[in-house]
């Protein structure tokens, strides 16, 4: 399918990915080519086929309900770009 | 074999005969030093820590203490696996300074086996690529021809073993990222069954496809390494709780009677004639050993790349949402509010291929398109797996070339994402189905480039897969070749 640059701009916002206008233009062309290629899947008859999200028959896995030590705060915060006390620093989202 | 040309099994035997782990590890560290300016396989090397681990093995050996399966053997690690306190970049600028606070399961298992971790290897950013050119840091070269790529995404790990900078390394395989570089570098690479090796501490790309596995010069070494890293781990809820066979014990037992399936789709358009003739010659080796060959069909395999690039990118778009400029990794300096902080940090931190895949995956999952793209791909995925199930009812293993061509030139496909994707055409179905696959060297082109044979088997049949691969190795000597560097 053909994509236009405004659709690609919207997807970049959904993906939380800042792209410049020239980057958006390149992305529009490249995604368009890939979508054209994957469009061949339309030729495959899949009526009644169950989607396969996973190679194994997975089920929820529970562990025993016993407390175990978790990552110490200092280690959990050791890679934080901005640390505020015992928290990750983020810009204010409420006035 | 002598010096750094030796296999892990050679090095284990040498230590039992009196050679020290320290001298072995020193030799490999020196090999890294002297060859790295040509190969550029490593993103980081920790010489002091490696020597310390080696001396510890020597001390314990002297005092008669029990040692692990890979005692004193140098191992290189793809930089997508978390190593406690050591930088883990995933080949990305977004993780340039990231020091994980814990070890991945595979790292703990290797340490438990007394292997010596020598360094972290280059890769396509977040394992997205087939040439290792998508690394944000450097271009790794194929040790057989420095103008060519080593394959990818585990290109650094493959090149490190081929160049004898380490006898063993760890890679990850989401669509062929172990088998394809193994093929292009003339070594052995094994992708285990999905769930065989815990993914705990592996920075996720596509969670329903990713598996961790070994690179080595020969099949015996891959068996040893798989034995060391496989097994159930409660920290990865998809790791499977079933016993790990002693792969290295049974490795020399031929499989008989053996029926080999050759998929007609793997010998068609796009396959280089030299690669085809090497793969067919490898099959004749098995025939001489008494194997029966049948033609099989994987009719939906022509759709595998289309399915893969929807499923893998959809999963990646979700997995890579964690890189937000808040918890770890790059954070933009200039931004206006929280959403802009996310968008700017990610826009600056991710390279072109990662952005492209996040965008494709986000689109495939977006409202109005999810049914037509993502769900459609999941349905065709089931048909692809069904092809494998049907084929494996008529044969024991499936064989064919690992990649359609030998290593291509640096830059040759860098500007054409689709052409690059097509180099994984024979390896991708295996990940979609969750089955194990191995690539072993089966010849060289007239131009001196390695060619790989891919062997695939049913789920959890690694033991059979390794024994079948070893049959070829015992009848040929391709695995003894080493490049001149």
Image (cartoon, coloured by chain):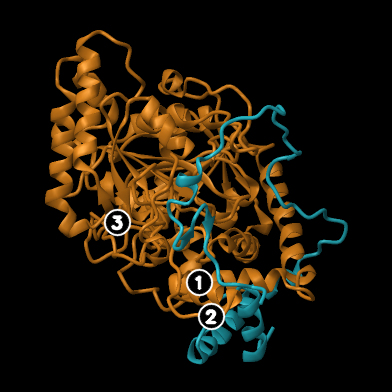
Chain colours: A cyan, B orange
Tell me if residue A17 comes above or below residue B96 in the rendering: below
Tell me the element at label 1: helix
- The local crowd at label 2, few if under 14, some if 14 to 19, many if 20 or more residues have their Cα within 10 Å, is many
Q: Which mark is residue B386?
A: none
- Report the residue at 55% width, 67% height from top: A90
Q: Which mark is residue B346?
A: 1
Task: Find residue B84 and report its image quarter.
Answer: top left
Tell me if residue B83 comes above or below residue B355 in the rendering: above
Task: Find residue B448 and report its image quarter.
Answer: bottom left
Q: Give percent across and percent down for residue A47.
A: 86, 61
Q: Mark 3–mark 1 contact, CB under 8 Å?
A: no
Q: Is the residue at mark 3 from the same chain as the one at mark 2?
A: no
Measure how far apart labels 3 and 1 are at the Cα level: 42 Å
Image quadrant containing the N terminus of chain B: top left
Q: Give percent across and percent down for residue B60.
A: 25, 15
Mark 3 or 1: in front is 1
Report if residue B282 is visible in the image: yes
Tell me if residue A70 comes above or below residue B343 in the rendering: above
Q: Is the residue at mark 3 from the same chain as the one at mark 1?
A: yes
Measure how far apart labels 2 and 1 are at the Cα level: 7 Å
Q: Mark 2–mark 1 contact, CB under 8 Å?
A: yes
Q: Nearer the viewer, residue A33 or B93?
A: B93
Residue position marked by numbered label 2 in the rendering: A18
Residue position marked by numbered label 3 in the rendering: B445
Q: Chain of mark 2?
A: A
- Report the residue at 23% width, 57% height from top: B40
């Amino acid at each position: 399918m053909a994509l236009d640059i405004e659709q690609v701009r919207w997807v970049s916002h959904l993906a939380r990915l800042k792209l410049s206008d020239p980057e958006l233009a390149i992305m529009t062309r490249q995604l368009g080519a890939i979508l054209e290629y994957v469009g061949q899947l339309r030729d495959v008859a899949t009526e009644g086929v169950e989607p396969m999200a996973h190679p194994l028959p997975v089920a929820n896995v529970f562990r025993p309900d016993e407390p175990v030590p978790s990552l110490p705060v200092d280690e959990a915060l050791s890679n934080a770009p901005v640390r505020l006390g015992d928290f990750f620093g983020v810009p204010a989202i409420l006035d | 074999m002598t010096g750094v040309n030796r296999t892990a099994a050679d090095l284990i035997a040498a230590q039992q005969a009196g050679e020290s782990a320290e001298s072995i590890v020193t030799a490999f560290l020196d090999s890294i030093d002297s060859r790295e300016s040509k190969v550029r396989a490593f993103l980081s090397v920790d010489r002091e820590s490696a020597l310390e681990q080696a001396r510890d093995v020597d001390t314990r050996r002297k005092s008669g203490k029990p040692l692990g399966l890979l005692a004193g053997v140098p191992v290189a690690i793809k930089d997508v696996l978390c190593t406690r306190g050591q930088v883990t970049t995933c080949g990305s600028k977004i993780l340039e300074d990231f020091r994980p606070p814990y070890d991945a399961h595979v790292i703990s298992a290797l340490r438990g086996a007394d292997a010596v971790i020598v360094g972290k290897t280059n890769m396509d950013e977040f394992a997205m690529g087939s040439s290792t050119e998508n690394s944000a840091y450097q271009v790794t070269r194929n040790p057989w021809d420095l103008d060519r790529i080593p394959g990818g995404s585990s290109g650094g790990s493959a090149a490190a073993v081929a160049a004898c900078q380490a006898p063993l390394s760890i890679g990850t395989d989401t669509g062929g990222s172990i088998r394809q570089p193994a093929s292009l570098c003339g070594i052995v690479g094994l992708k285990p069954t999905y769930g065989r090796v815990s993914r705990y501490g592996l920075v996720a790309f596509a969670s329903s496809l990713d598996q961790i596995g070994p690179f080595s010069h020969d099949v015996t070494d891959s068996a040893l390494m798989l034995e060391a890293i496989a097994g159930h781990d409660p920290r990865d809820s998809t790791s499977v709780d079933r016993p790990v066979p002693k792969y290295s014990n049974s490795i020399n037992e031929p499989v008989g009677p053996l029926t080999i399936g050759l998929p007609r789709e793997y010998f068609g358009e796009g396959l280089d004639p030299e690669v085809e003739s090497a793969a067919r010659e490898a099959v004749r080796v098995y025939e001489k050993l008494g194997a029966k060959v049948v033609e099989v069909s994987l009719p939906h395999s022509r759709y595998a790349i289309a399915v893969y690039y929807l499923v893998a990118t959809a999963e990646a778009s979700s997995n890579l949402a964690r890189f937000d400029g808040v918890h770890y990794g790059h954070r933009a300096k200039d931004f206006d509010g929280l959403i802009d902080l996310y968008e700017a940090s990610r826009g600056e931190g991710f390279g072109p291929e990662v952005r492209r895949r996040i965008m494709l995956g986000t689109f495939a999952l977006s409202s109005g398109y999810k049914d037509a793209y993502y769900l459609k791909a999941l349905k065709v995925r089931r048909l692809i797996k069904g092809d494998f199930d049907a084929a494996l009812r008529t044969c024991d293993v499936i064989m064919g070339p690992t990649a359609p061509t030998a290593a291509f030139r640096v830059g040759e496909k860098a500007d054409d994402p689709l052409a690059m994707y097509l180099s994984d055409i024979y390896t991708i179905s295996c990940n979609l189905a969750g089955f194990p696959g191995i690539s072993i060297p089966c010849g060289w082109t007239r131009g001196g480039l390695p060619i790989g044979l891919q062997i695939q088997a049913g789920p959890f049949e690694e033991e059979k897969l390794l024994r079948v691969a070893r049959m070829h190795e015992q009848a040929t000597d391709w695995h003894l070749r080493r490049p001149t560097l």
